[in-house]
Image (cartoon, rainbow, N blue to C red):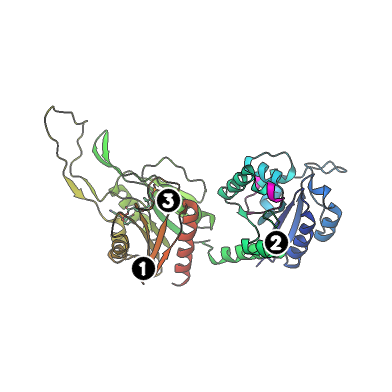
Amino acid sequence: MLKGKNIIVGITGSIAAYKAAYLVRGLIKKGCEVQVVMTPAGKEFITPVTLSALTGKPVISEFFTANTGSWNSHVDLGLWADAVVIAPASASTIGKMANGIADNMLITTYLSAKAPVFVAPAMDLDMFAHPSTTRNIERLRSYGNTIIEPASGELASHLIGKGRMEEPDKIIEVLEEYFDEKKKSNLTGKKVMITAGPTYEKIDPVRFIGNYSSGKMGYALAEECAARGAEVTLISGPVNIKARNKAIKVIDVESALQMHKEALENFSQSDIIILCAAVADYRPDFVAEKKMKRKEGEEIKISLVPNPDIAADLGSKVSPEQVMVGFALETNDEENNAVLKIRKKNLDFIVLNSLNDKGAGFRTDTNKITIIDKEGNKFPFELKSKSDVAKDIISKVSETISLK
Ligand code: PMT
Protein backbone atom coordinates (compact mmCIF):
# COMPACT_ATOMS: atom_id res chain seq x y z
CA MET A 1 0.00 0.00 0.00
CA LEU A 2 2.78 2.41 0.86
CA LYS A 3 5.09 0.94 -1.78
CA GLY A 4 6.19 3.52 -4.32
CA LYS A 5 4.76 6.47 -2.39
CA ASN A 6 6.77 9.70 -2.14
CA ILE A 7 6.76 10.91 1.45
CA ILE A 8 8.14 14.14 2.88
CA VAL A 9 9.12 13.70 6.52
CA GLY A 10 9.33 17.08 8.27
CA ILE A 11 11.41 17.13 11.45
CA THR A 12 11.25 20.01 13.91
CA GLY A 13 12.92 21.02 17.17
CA SER A 14 11.74 18.50 19.72
CA ILE A 15 13.38 15.95 21.93
CA ALA A 16 11.31 13.34 20.06
CA ALA A 17 13.29 14.07 16.85
CA TYR A 18 15.30 10.85 17.38
CA LYS A 19 12.06 8.91 16.72
CA ALA A 20 11.97 10.41 13.24
CA ALA A 21 14.93 8.17 12.31
CA TYR A 22 12.80 5.09 13.13
CA LEU A 23 9.90 6.60 11.16
CA VAL A 24 12.11 7.20 8.11
CA ARG A 25 13.61 3.70 8.35
CA GLY A 26 10.12 2.15 8.66
CA LEU A 27 8.80 4.05 5.63
CA ILE A 28 11.80 3.01 3.54
CA LYS A 29 11.26 -0.61 4.57
CA LYS A 30 7.68 -0.28 3.26
CA GLY A 31 9.03 0.79 -0.14
CA CYS A 32 8.51 4.57 0.14
CA GLU A 33 10.82 7.19 -1.26
CA VAL A 34 11.49 9.60 1.59
CA GLN A 35 12.71 13.17 1.49
CA VAL A 36 13.56 14.66 4.87
CA VAL A 37 12.98 18.39 5.38
CA MET A 38 14.25 19.80 8.71
CA THR A 39 13.72 23.07 10.48
CA PRO A 40 16.87 24.77 11.82
CA ALA A 41 15.81 23.77 15.37
CA GLY A 42 15.30 20.16 14.26
CA LYS A 43 19.01 19.94 13.39
CA GLU A 44 19.85 20.68 17.04
CA PHE A 45 18.20 17.42 18.06
CA ILE A 46 19.27 14.94 15.35
CA THR A 47 21.99 15.25 12.74
CA PRO A 48 21.06 15.46 9.06
CA VAL A 49 23.85 12.93 8.37
CA THR A 50 21.90 10.16 10.17
CA LEU A 51 18.81 10.90 8.12
CA SER A 52 20.51 11.27 4.75
CA ALA A 53 22.28 7.94 5.39
CA LEU A 54 18.85 6.35 5.85
CA THR A 55 17.17 7.95 2.83
CA GLY A 56 20.18 8.03 0.52
CA LYS A 57 19.36 11.69 -0.21
CA PRO A 58 20.62 14.99 1.17
CA VAL A 59 18.40 16.44 3.86
CA ILE A 60 16.76 19.72 2.84
CA SER A 61 16.76 22.45 5.40
CA GLU A 62 17.68 25.73 3.74
CA PHE A 63 16.18 27.58 0.76
CA PHE A 64 19.62 27.39 -0.92
CA THR A 65 22.17 24.56 -0.78
CA ALA A 66 25.24 26.09 0.90
CA ASN A 67 28.05 24.69 -1.29
CA THR A 68 26.37 24.82 -4.73
CA GLY A 69 24.07 27.80 -4.20
CA SER A 70 21.28 25.89 -5.98
CA TRP A 71 17.72 26.67 -4.99
CA ASN A 72 15.54 24.09 -3.25
CA SER A 73 12.10 24.48 -4.76
CA HIS A 74 9.41 24.03 -2.14
CA VAL A 75 6.80 24.07 -4.93
CA ASP A 76 8.40 21.11 -6.75
CA LEU A 77 8.77 19.28 -3.44
CA GLY A 78 5.14 19.93 -2.59
CA LEU A 79 4.04 18.54 -5.96
CA TRP A 80 6.34 15.50 -5.71
CA ALA A 81 4.90 14.31 -2.39
CA ASP A 82 2.04 11.82 -2.01
CA ALA A 83 1.97 12.68 1.69
CA VAL A 84 3.68 15.08 4.09
CA VAL A 85 4.32 13.79 7.61
CA ILE A 86 5.53 16.27 10.19
CA ALA A 87 6.88 14.23 13.10
CA PRO A 88 7.77 15.48 15.58
CA ALA A 89 5.79 18.70 15.19
CA SER A 90 6.82 21.24 17.85
CA ALA A 91 4.43 23.88 19.25
CA SER A 92 6.32 26.52 17.29
CA THR A 93 5.98 24.70 13.95
CA ILE A 94 2.30 23.96 14.60
CA GLY A 95 1.78 27.67 15.32
CA LYS A 96 3.54 28.66 12.09
CA MET A 97 1.55 26.11 10.07
CA ALA A 98 -1.71 27.34 11.56
CA ASN A 99 -0.90 30.95 10.73
CA GLY A 100 1.04 30.65 7.46
CA ILE A 101 4.35 31.97 8.85
CA ALA A 102 6.61 30.75 6.08
CA ASP A 103 10.04 31.49 7.52
CA ASN A 104 11.68 28.13 6.85
CA MET A 105 11.81 25.49 4.15
CA LEU A 106 9.46 23.11 5.97
CA ILE A 107 6.64 25.66 6.29
CA THR A 108 6.97 26.86 2.67
CA THR A 109 6.84 23.21 1.56
CA TYR A 110 3.78 22.63 3.78
CA LEU A 111 2.01 25.66 2.30
CA SER A 112 2.74 24.54 -1.27
CA ALA A 113 1.91 20.86 -0.79
CA LYS A 114 -1.09 19.45 -2.62
CA ALA A 115 -0.77 16.14 -0.76
CA PRO A 116 -2.46 15.22 2.54
CA VAL A 117 -0.60 16.35 5.64
CA PHE A 118 -0.17 14.29 8.82
CA VAL A 119 1.03 16.01 11.97
CA ALA A 120 2.38 14.23 15.07
CA PRO A 121 2.67 16.85 17.84
CA ALA A 122 5.47 16.49 20.40
CA MET A 123 5.95 18.80 23.34
CA ASP A 124 5.62 18.83 27.10
CA LEU A 125 2.19 18.65 28.71
CA ASP A 126 1.95 22.33 29.70
CA MET A 127 2.80 23.54 26.22
CA PHE A 128 0.34 21.06 24.75
CA ALA A 129 -2.43 22.19 27.11
CA HIS A 130 -1.92 25.92 26.42
CA PRO A 131 -4.98 27.44 24.71
CA SER A 132 -2.84 28.78 21.84
CA THR A 133 -1.55 25.26 21.06
CA THR A 134 -5.05 23.79 21.33
CA ARG A 135 -6.38 26.48 19.00
CA ASN A 136 -3.55 25.99 16.48
CA ILE A 137 -4.07 22.22 16.43
CA GLU A 138 -7.81 22.78 15.87
CA ARG A 139 -6.94 25.14 13.02
CA LEU A 140 -4.76 22.49 11.39
CA ARG A 141 -7.66 20.05 11.67
CA SER A 142 -9.98 22.58 10.05
CA TYR A 143 -7.47 22.88 7.14
CA GLY A 144 -7.98 19.13 6.59
CA ASN A 145 -4.65 18.05 8.17
CA THR A 146 -4.69 14.80 10.13
CA ILE A 147 -3.40 15.07 13.70
CA ILE A 148 -1.80 11.85 14.91
CA GLU A 149 -1.78 11.46 18.69
CA PRO A 150 -1.44 8.44 20.97
CA ALA A 151 -4.86 7.02 21.92
CA SER A 152 -5.90 8.25 25.39
CA GLY A 153 -6.04 4.69 26.78
CA GLU A 154 -2.44 4.16 25.75
CA LEU A 155 -1.36 7.35 27.48
CA ALA A 156 -2.84 6.20 30.77
CA SER A 157 -1.21 2.79 30.57
CA HIS A 158 2.20 4.31 29.84
CA LEU A 159 1.72 6.91 32.57
CA ILE A 160 2.99 9.49 30.11
CA GLY A 161 1.26 12.79 29.55
CA LYS A 162 -0.45 14.23 26.51
CA GLY A 163 1.90 15.82 24.00
CA ARG A 164 4.04 12.69 23.64
CA MET A 165 4.76 11.96 19.99
CA GLU A 166 2.96 8.93 18.59
CA GLU A 167 5.25 5.92 18.01
CA PRO A 168 6.70 5.62 14.46
CA ASP A 169 5.04 2.24 13.74
CA LYS A 170 1.63 3.73 14.66
CA ILE A 171 2.24 6.70 12.35
CA ILE A 172 3.06 4.27 9.55
CA GLU A 173 -0.21 2.40 10.29
CA VAL A 174 -2.19 5.65 9.92
CA LEU A 175 -0.53 6.29 6.54
CA GLU A 176 -1.20 2.73 5.38
CA GLU A 177 -4.86 3.08 6.34
CA TYR A 178 -5.10 6.39 4.54
CA PHE A 179 -3.75 5.02 1.25
CA ASP A 180 -5.83 1.87 1.56
CA GLU A 181 -9.01 3.88 2.21
CA LYS A 182 -8.13 6.16 -0.67
CA LYS A 183 -7.79 3.18 -3.00
CA LYS A 184 -11.15 1.82 -1.87
CA SER A 185 -12.94 5.11 -2.26
CA ASN A 186 -11.26 6.36 -5.41
CA LEU A 187 -13.68 7.94 -7.91
CA THR A 188 -11.19 8.45 -10.76
CA GLY A 189 -12.96 8.13 -14.10
CA LYS A 190 -16.41 8.52 -12.53
CA LYS A 191 -18.84 11.25 -13.57
CA VAL A 192 -20.86 12.78 -10.77
CA MET A 193 -23.86 15.09 -11.06
CA ILE A 194 -24.85 17.07 -7.97
CA THR A 195 -27.70 19.52 -7.43
CA ALA A 196 -27.11 22.16 -4.75
CA GLY A 197 -28.54 25.31 -3.22
CA PRO A 198 -32.06 26.69 -3.31
CA THR A 199 -34.30 27.47 -6.26
CA TYR A 200 -35.90 30.87 -6.71
CA GLU A 201 -39.42 30.91 -8.13
CA LYS A 202 -40.22 34.30 -9.63
CA ILE A 203 -43.30 36.30 -8.62
CA ASP A 204 -42.37 39.43 -10.56
CA PRO A 205 -39.04 40.99 -11.72
CA VAL A 206 -38.01 41.84 -8.12
CA ARG A 207 -39.58 39.11 -5.95
CA PHE A 208 -39.36 35.38 -5.65
CA ILE A 209 -40.27 32.43 -3.45
CA GLY A 210 -37.10 30.79 -2.14
CA ASN A 211 -35.65 28.95 0.84
CA TYR A 212 -32.67 29.18 3.20
CA SER A 213 -30.33 26.73 1.46
CA SER A 214 -26.81 28.22 1.21
CA GLY A 215 -25.35 25.52 -1.05
CA LYS A 216 -22.67 24.66 1.55
CA MET A 217 -23.62 20.97 1.77
CA GLY A 218 -23.84 20.47 -2.00
CA TYR A 219 -20.58 22.31 -2.69
CA ALA A 220 -18.80 20.27 0.03
CA LEU A 221 -19.98 17.10 -1.73
CA ALA A 222 -18.71 18.40 -5.07
CA GLU A 223 -15.28 19.23 -3.57
CA GLU A 224 -15.05 15.79 -1.94
CA CYS A 225 -15.92 13.97 -5.20
CA ALA A 226 -13.41 16.08 -7.14
CA ALA A 227 -10.73 15.43 -4.50
CA ARG A 228 -11.30 11.70 -5.06
CA GLY A 229 -10.70 12.09 -8.78
CA ALA A 230 -14.25 12.38 -10.14
CA GLU A 231 -15.42 14.71 -12.90
CA VAL A 232 -18.21 16.73 -11.29
CA THR A 233 -21.13 18.64 -12.78
CA LEU A 234 -22.65 20.84 -10.11
CA ILE A 235 -26.08 22.22 -10.97
CA SER A 236 -26.38 25.09 -8.56
CA GLY A 237 -29.19 27.37 -7.53
CA PRO A 238 -28.31 30.97 -6.53
CA VAL A 239 -25.62 30.84 -3.80
CA ASN A 240 -22.72 32.96 -2.61
CA ILE A 241 -19.99 30.32 -2.78
CA LYS A 242 -17.57 29.31 -5.50
CA ALA A 243 -16.28 25.85 -6.37
CA ARG A 244 -12.53 25.59 -5.74
CA ASN A 245 -11.53 22.41 -7.58
CA LYS A 246 -11.05 22.77 -11.34
CA ALA A 247 -12.65 19.34 -11.88
CA ILE A 248 -16.01 20.87 -10.91
CA LYS A 249 -18.11 22.28 -13.74
CA VAL A 250 -20.75 24.59 -12.32
CA ILE A 251 -24.03 25.12 -14.16
CA ASP A 252 -25.85 28.08 -12.60
CA VAL A 253 -29.63 27.95 -12.57
CA GLU A 254 -32.32 29.89 -10.77
CA SER A 255 -35.63 28.03 -10.88
CA ALA A 256 -36.71 24.43 -10.38
CA LEU A 257 -37.67 24.23 -14.06
CA GLN A 258 -34.15 25.28 -15.11
CA MET A 259 -32.60 22.82 -12.62
CA HIS A 260 -34.85 20.06 -13.94
CA LYS A 261 -33.81 20.76 -17.56
CA GLU A 262 -30.06 20.73 -16.74
CA ALA A 263 -30.41 17.60 -14.59
CA LEU A 264 -32.15 15.75 -17.43
CA GLU A 265 -29.44 16.81 -19.87
CA ASN A 266 -26.60 15.58 -17.67
CA PHE A 267 -28.28 12.54 -16.15
CA SER A 268 -27.57 9.73 -18.62
CA GLN A 269 -23.79 10.33 -18.74
CA SER A 270 -23.51 10.39 -14.92
CA ASP A 271 -22.39 7.37 -12.88
CA ILE A 272 -23.38 9.01 -9.60
CA ILE A 273 -26.26 11.41 -9.01
CA ILE A 274 -26.59 13.30 -5.73
CA LEU A 275 -29.66 15.49 -5.21
CA CYS A 276 -28.81 17.89 -2.44
CA ALA A 277 -30.70 20.97 -3.67
CA ALA A 278 -33.65 22.35 -1.75
CA VAL A 279 -35.97 22.52 -4.75
CA ALA A 280 -39.18 24.54 -4.46
CA ASP A 281 -42.08 22.12 -4.82
CA TYR A 282 -44.33 24.88 -6.17
CA ARG A 283 -44.00 28.03 -8.28
CA PRO A 284 -46.38 30.92 -8.93
CA ASP A 285 -48.64 30.03 -11.83
CA PHE A 286 -48.18 33.52 -13.19
CA VAL A 287 -45.08 35.76 -13.27
CA ALA A 288 -45.93 39.47 -13.47
CA GLU A 289 -43.98 41.23 -16.23
CA LYS A 290 -43.68 44.45 -14.22
CA LYS A 291 -43.12 45.00 -10.50
CA MET A 292 -46.40 44.40 -8.71
CA LYS A 293 -47.67 47.59 -7.09
CA ARG A 294 -49.07 47.87 -3.61
CA LYS A 295 -52.78 48.67 -3.63
CA GLU A 296 -53.91 50.04 -0.29
CA GLY A 297 -56.34 47.72 1.50
CA GLU A 298 -56.24 45.08 -1.24
CA GLU A 299 -55.28 41.48 -0.56
CA ILE A 300 -53.03 39.67 -3.02
CA LYS A 301 -53.28 35.93 -3.53
CA ILE A 302 -50.59 34.04 -5.36
CA SER A 303 -51.67 30.71 -6.70
CA LEU A 304 -48.99 28.05 -6.96
CA VAL A 305 -48.58 25.17 -9.39
CA PRO A 306 -46.42 22.10 -8.72
CA ASN A 307 -42.84 21.97 -9.97
CA PRO A 308 -41.48 18.73 -11.35
CA ASP A 309 -40.01 16.42 -8.71
CA ILE A 310 -36.52 16.18 -10.22
CA ALA A 311 -35.45 13.26 -8.01
CA ALA A 312 -38.60 11.22 -8.76
CA ASP A 313 -38.30 11.93 -12.48
CA LEU A 314 -34.64 10.80 -12.60
CA GLY A 315 -35.51 7.85 -10.32
CA SER A 316 -37.95 6.56 -12.95
CA LYS A 317 -35.12 6.52 -15.52
CA VAL A 318 -32.16 5.38 -13.37
CA SER A 319 -30.19 2.35 -14.61
CA PRO A 320 -28.98 -0.44 -12.30
CA GLU A 321 -25.35 0.70 -12.75
CA GLN A 322 -26.01 4.28 -11.63
CA VAL A 323 -25.96 5.28 -7.96
CA MET A 324 -28.61 7.80 -6.96
CA VAL A 325 -28.65 9.56 -3.62
CA GLY A 326 -31.27 11.97 -2.28
CA PHE A 327 -31.55 14.17 0.78
CA ALA A 328 -34.45 14.60 3.16
CA LEU A 329 -34.78 17.74 5.22
CA GLU A 330 -37.43 17.03 7.81
CA THR A 331 -39.06 18.73 10.77
CA ASN A 332 -41.15 15.83 12.11
CA ASP A 333 -41.58 12.06 11.80
CA GLU A 334 -38.14 12.21 10.22
CA GLU A 335 -37.20 8.58 9.59
CA ASN A 336 -40.62 7.52 8.23
CA ASN A 337 -40.71 10.48 5.86
CA ALA A 338 -37.17 9.72 4.69
CA VAL A 339 -37.96 6.05 4.06
CA LEU A 340 -41.03 7.01 2.00
CA LYS A 341 -38.83 9.30 -0.13
CA ILE A 342 -36.35 6.46 -0.87
CA ARG A 343 -39.21 4.50 -2.44
CA LYS A 344 -40.96 7.38 -4.15
CA LYS A 345 -37.73 8.63 -5.74
CA ASN A 346 -36.11 5.20 -6.31
CA LEU A 347 -32.89 6.08 -4.45
CA ASP A 348 -30.00 3.86 -3.38
CA PHE A 349 -29.90 5.76 -0.15
CA ILE A 350 -31.12 8.96 1.43
CA VAL A 351 -29.30 11.42 3.68
CA LEU A 352 -31.62 12.56 6.42
CA ASN A 353 -31.00 15.86 8.20
CA SER A 354 -33.48 17.27 10.66
CA LEU A 355 -34.16 20.87 11.57
CA ASN A 356 -34.67 19.62 15.14
CA ASP A 357 -30.92 18.95 15.48
CA LYS A 358 -28.92 21.99 16.51
CA GLY A 359 -26.22 22.80 13.94
CA ALA A 360 -27.90 20.71 11.22
CA GLY A 361 -29.53 21.63 7.92
CA PHE A 362 -29.63 25.04 6.23
CA ARG A 363 -26.81 27.63 6.26
CA THR A 364 -24.69 26.17 9.10
CA ASP A 365 -21.09 25.01 8.54
CA THR A 366 -22.01 21.74 10.25
CA ASN A 367 -24.55 19.00 9.72
CA LYS A 368 -25.83 15.94 11.55
CA ILE A 369 -27.04 13.19 9.28
CA THR A 370 -28.43 9.68 9.24
CA ILE A 371 -27.91 7.66 6.07
CA ILE A 372 -30.78 5.25 5.39
CA ASP A 373 -30.33 2.75 2.56
CA LYS A 374 -33.05 1.11 0.51
CA GLU A 375 -32.78 -2.08 2.60
CA GLY A 376 -33.73 0.07 5.61
CA ASN A 377 -30.28 0.01 7.30
CA LYS A 378 -29.61 3.16 9.28
CA PHE A 379 -26.21 4.79 9.81
CA PRO A 380 -26.36 7.75 12.22
CA PHE A 381 -23.40 10.15 12.37
CA GLU A 382 -22.29 12.77 14.89
CA LEU A 383 -22.49 16.53 14.27
CA LYS A 384 -19.54 17.34 11.97
CA SER A 385 -18.32 20.02 9.58
CA LYS A 386 -20.09 19.80 6.22
CA SER A 387 -16.79 18.81 4.59
CA ASP A 388 -16.46 15.84 6.98
CA VAL A 389 -20.13 14.96 6.43
CA ALA A 390 -19.39 14.97 2.69
CA LYS A 391 -16.55 12.47 3.29
CA ASP A 392 -18.95 10.10 5.09
CA ILE A 393 -21.55 10.40 2.32
CA ILE A 394 -19.05 9.88 -0.51
CA SER A 395 -17.50 6.87 1.28
CA LYS A 396 -21.00 5.36 1.32
CA VAL A 397 -21.40 6.22 -2.38
CA SER A 398 -18.08 4.45 -3.15
CA GLU A 399 -19.17 1.40 -1.18
CA THR A 400 -22.51 1.33 -3.04
CA ILE A 401 -20.92 1.68 -6.50
CA SER A 402 -18.42 -1.10 -5.72
CA LEU A 403 -21.34 -3.46 -4.99
CA LYS A 404 -23.13 -2.76 -8.30
O1 PMT B 1 -27.44 24.31 1.33
P1 PMT B 1 -27.20 24.23 2.83
O2 PMT B 1 -27.49 25.53 3.52
O3 PMT B 1 -25.83 23.68 3.14
O4 PMT B 1 -28.26 23.19 3.44
C1 PMT B 1 -28.20 21.83 3.09
C2 PMT B 1 -29.61 21.26 2.90
C3 PMT B 1 -30.36 21.33 4.21
C4 PMT B 1 -30.37 22.02 1.81
C5 PMT B 1 -29.40 19.76 2.45
O5 PMT B 1 -28.68 19.09 3.43
C6 PMT B 1 -30.72 19.08 2.20
O6 PMT B 1 -31.33 18.50 3.08
N1 PMT B 1 -31.21 19.12 0.91
C7 PMT B 1 -32.53 18.62 0.53
C8 PMT B 1 -33.59 19.56 0.99
C9 PMT B 1 -34.93 19.18 0.51
O7 PMT B 1 -35.48 19.86 -0.33
O8 PMT B 1 -35.41 18.05 0.99
P2 PMT B 1 -36.84 17.41 0.52
O9 PMT B 1 -37.12 16.46 1.59
O10 PMT B 1 -37.83 18.48 0.27
O11 PMT B 1 -36.54 16.69 -0.84
C10 PMT B 1 -36.21 15.33 -0.95
C11 PMT B 1 -35.27 15.06 -2.11
O12 PMT B 1 -35.92 15.32 -3.36
C12 PMT B 1 -34.02 15.93 -2.11
O13 PMT B 1 -32.98 15.11 -2.59
C13 PMT B 1 -34.36 17.04 -3.11
O14 PMT B 1 -33.20 17.55 -3.76
C14 PMT B 1 -35.23 16.29 -4.09
N2 PMT B 1 -36.27 17.14 -4.74
C15 PMT B 1 -37.26 17.72 -4.02
C16 PMT B 1 -38.25 18.44 -4.64
C17 PMT B 1 -38.21 18.57 -6.04
N3 PMT B 1 -39.15 19.26 -6.67
N4 PMT B 1 -37.22 18.00 -6.74
C18 PMT B 1 -36.25 17.29 -6.12
O15 PMT B 1 -35.33 16.79 -6.76
Horizontally, residue 346 falls left or right of residue 93, namely left
Which quadrant of the view contains residue 9?
A: bottom right
- Tell me which residue sits at (69%, 39%) in the image: 102
* Residue at horizontal 75 percent and vertical 65 percent from the top: 26
The quadrant of the rendering that contains the N terminus is: bottom right
Secondary structure beneath disc 2?
loop
Q: Is residue 270 visible?
A: no
Q: CA distance from mark 2 to mark 1?
A: 57 Å
In the image, is the residue at mark 3 within 8 Å of ligand 1 by its beta carbon?
Answer: yes
Image x and y of residue 166, in percent = 69, 59
Give me the disc on residue 319. Answer: 1
Q: Amino acid at mark 2?
A: Leu
Q: Say which mark, if any, is on residue 159.
A: 2
Few, some or many residues within 10 Å of mark 1 (<14, 14–19, 20+):
few
* Residue 246 lies in the magenta-colored region: no
Tell me whether the residue at label 2 lies in contact with that at label 3, contact meaning CB atoms closer than 8 angstroms: no
Q: Is 385 left or right of 360, judged from the image as shown? A: right
Query: Would you identify the image quadrant in which residue 263 lies?
Result: bottom left
Instruction: Please name the amino acid that badge 1 sits on.
Output: Ser
Q: Which residues are magenta?
A: 111-126
Q: CA distance from mark 2 to mark 3?
A: 42 Å
Report the Cα–Cα distance between label 1 and label 3: 26 Å
Q: Position of residue 283 (x, y in %)?
A: 22, 46
The quarter of the image holding the C terminus is bottom left
Q: Where is residue 328? Give x, y as percent.
A: 33, 57
What amino acid is found at the position of numbered circle 3 in the picture? Met
Please tell me how crowded label 3 is: few (under 14), some (14-19), or many (20+) other residues with Cα within 10 Å. Answer: many
Which comes sooner in the sequence, label 2 or label 1?
A: 2
Q: Is residue 240 left or right of residue 22?
A: left
Q: Earlier in the sequence, mark 2 or mark 3?
A: 2
The residue tagged 3 is 217
Q: Position of residue 173 (x, y in %)?
A: 66, 65
